[in-house]
Image (cartoon, rainbow, N blue to C red):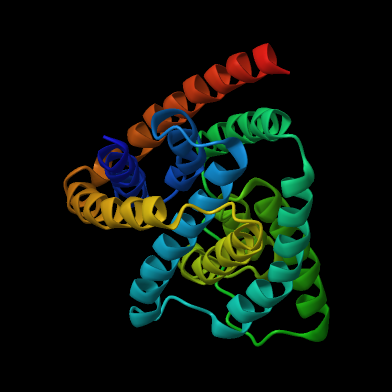
Amino acid sequence: MHDFLALISGSFVGLILGLIGGGGSIMATPLLLYLVGMSPHVAVGTGAVAVSANAFLNFANHARAGNVRWATAGTFAATGVAGAFIGSSIGKAVDGNRLVLLFAILMLIVGMSMLQPRRNGGTAIAALTPKMICRVAAIAFCVGLLAGFFGIGGGFLIVPALIFATDMPIINAIGSSLLAVAAFGLATAVNYSFSGLVDWPVAAEFIGGGVVGGWIGTKLACEFAAQRGTLNRVFAGVIFVVAFYIIWRSTRQI
């Protein structure tokens, strides 16, 4: 049953990612925590492995499609990894129940961001200037810090951050962001694994389920493309419900 629940959890996250293109990874930690039955820190560490693997797979697809701005993506990922290591080290030192409570607050922010219309970005294709590199690096470090602390990919922050810093089109921001998401998740996973806070068999099952769920979600996305906004709102509602449940559980235990 433990293995089955890990597969189902991974399938759900992959389905959401394939169907609406983002937000699903925020559900990895709650699913591992409450459905699979992990402790808070192990759920964060194991979820980071799954987030990283999923992002690498999707990044490869975008790279083949030519959607990646390599210089910007590399700068963001390299700088943000330092923040992710620091953030994950802080996260390990925080009491598990308090970490989960803070995670629920983050979920509310993610849910609200999903209800906002996305900016499509600009058309900038110029090479990075020194000023732009500094701006990208500063934003990347802050986002990496947050991603490492919570064990998330941070894509919901990285995409608008890349558009803000470089004015690139949204498709390039999405493709480029996945390198950072994968790198941040990997940095967090490695840091947590040093402390024995990653359940590797469950991570493998979660990733396996995510591959299947992602394939199904991608197929469904083609059929429900016109309803993408509605799907975003529905999933945002699910995030709100889960977040309030976590807050209720956490406040009873603190």
Quadrant of the frame with the C terminus: top right
Q: Is residue 70 visible?
A: yes
Q: Image point 50% across, 51% down: which residue?
A: 46
Q: Quadrant of residue 76?
A: bottom right
Left or right: where does residue 9 sit relative to residue 86? left
Figure disc tally: 0
Q: Is residue 139 visible?
A: no
Compared with 53, 245 (above or below) is above
Image location of residue 65, percent across then percent down: 34, 78
Q: Image point 64% across, 73% down: which residue?
A: 77
Image location of residue 12, percent across then percent down: 31, 41
Image location of residue 104, percent across then percent down: 61, 29
Quadrant of the frame with the N terminus: top left
Q: Quadrant of residue 214?
A: bottom left
Compared with 171, 234 (above or below) is above
Q: Image point 19% across, 47% down: which residue?
A: 220
Toward the front, the furthest residue is: 196
